[in-house]
């Protein structure tokens, strides 16, 4: 276990500013001389990117919640095997835009309570949890208008609407409350620079 890298994940509702903040953290860590791998879920490996198109595009009712959990977990397993674990073993810092907490919220809460199933599959298939998770907390009315403003084809979950985003915001905050050592909450409504500074402070504290 010597020379193991650090696994940092970012979570939050749609439009919470994760993409901007993952990039700012990557640049800040590169400037400090760290070896950084940036990745994302669903995706982050060739096979998982193929699964990404299946799960994010098309009609919101395209998959049942159970099938979706299997697809996200399959994508995650491939991403771990091919991208995340090799980088950590090489001592790198891995920054991942979304990870298992997104499955706990989106698939666990979107159509009934499937959280137990998500956790069971996770325990069976995913060999490593993040060292640090940054939760960017955001008012869903602000987040959703930002996310919809992008007009991409990957809108299956944004199409579930405001009520769902509100439920997820509460769920993410509850997760953070249950696991405060791993999950650190940052207020996403501050300016991007202020948010970036809070995140860098959290990460630096974990690097010493
Ligand atoms: P992402 O590309 O991070 O979108 P955004 O920048 O708008 O937050 O994530 C794409 C979508 O995938 C997002 O709506 C959440 C969804 N998702 C799940 O439903 N389950 C998962 O396990 C993951 C990783 C993502």
Image (cartoon, grey):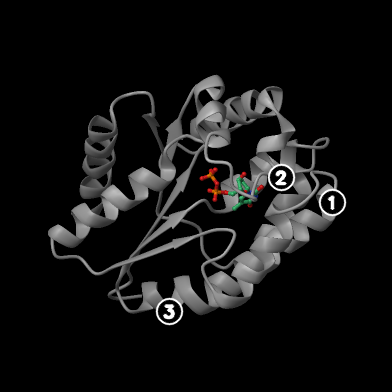
| Neighbours of disc 2 within 10 Å: few (<14), some (14-19), many (20+) | some
Q: Residue at x 52, y 79 (%)?
A: 82
Tell me where residue 145 sits by quadrant: top right
Ligand 1 within 8 Å of the CB at mark 1? no
Q: CA distance from mark 2 to mark 1?
A: 9 Å
Eye-nearest disc, 3 or 1:
1
**Residue contact between numbered discs 3 and 2, judged by CB atoms under 8 Å:** no
Q: Residue at x 30, y 70 (%)?
A: 92
Q: Which residue is mark 1?
A: 62
Q: Quadrant of the N terminus?
A: bottom left
- In x, y percent, where is residue 37? 35, 67
Q: Nearer the viewer, residue 85 or 60?
A: 60
Q: Which residue is mark 2?
A: 156
Does residue 30 appear left or right of residue 104 in this picture? left
Q: Nearer the viewer, residue 41 or 141?
A: 141
Q: Secondary structure under badge 3?
A: helix
């Amino acid at each position: 276990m010597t020379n193991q890298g650090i696994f940092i994940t970012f979570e939050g509702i749609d439009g919470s500013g994760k993409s901007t903040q993952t990039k700012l953290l990557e640049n800040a860590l590169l400037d400090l001389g760290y070896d950084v791998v940036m990745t994302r879920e669903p995706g982050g490996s060739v096979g998982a990117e193929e699964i990404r198109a299946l799960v994010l595009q098309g009609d919101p009712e395209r998959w049942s919640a159970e099938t979706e959990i299997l697809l996200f977990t399959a994508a995650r397993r491939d991403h771990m095997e091919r991208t995340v674990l090799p980088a950590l073993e090489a001592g790198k810092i891995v920054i991942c835009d979304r990870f298992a907490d997104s499955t706990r919220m989106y698939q666990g809460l979107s159509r009934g309570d499937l959280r137990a199933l998500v956790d069971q599959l996770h325990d069976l298939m995913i060999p490593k949890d993040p060292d640090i998770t940054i939760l960017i907390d955001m008012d869903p009315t602000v987040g959703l208008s930002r996310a919809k403003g992008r007009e991409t084809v990957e809108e299956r979950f944004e199409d579930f609407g405001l009520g769902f985003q509100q439920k997820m915001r509460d769920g993410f905050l509850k997760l953070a409350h249950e696991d405060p050592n791993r999950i650190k909450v940052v207020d996403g409504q501050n300016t991007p620079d202020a948010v970036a500074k809070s995140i860098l402070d959290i990460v630096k504290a974990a690097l010493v």
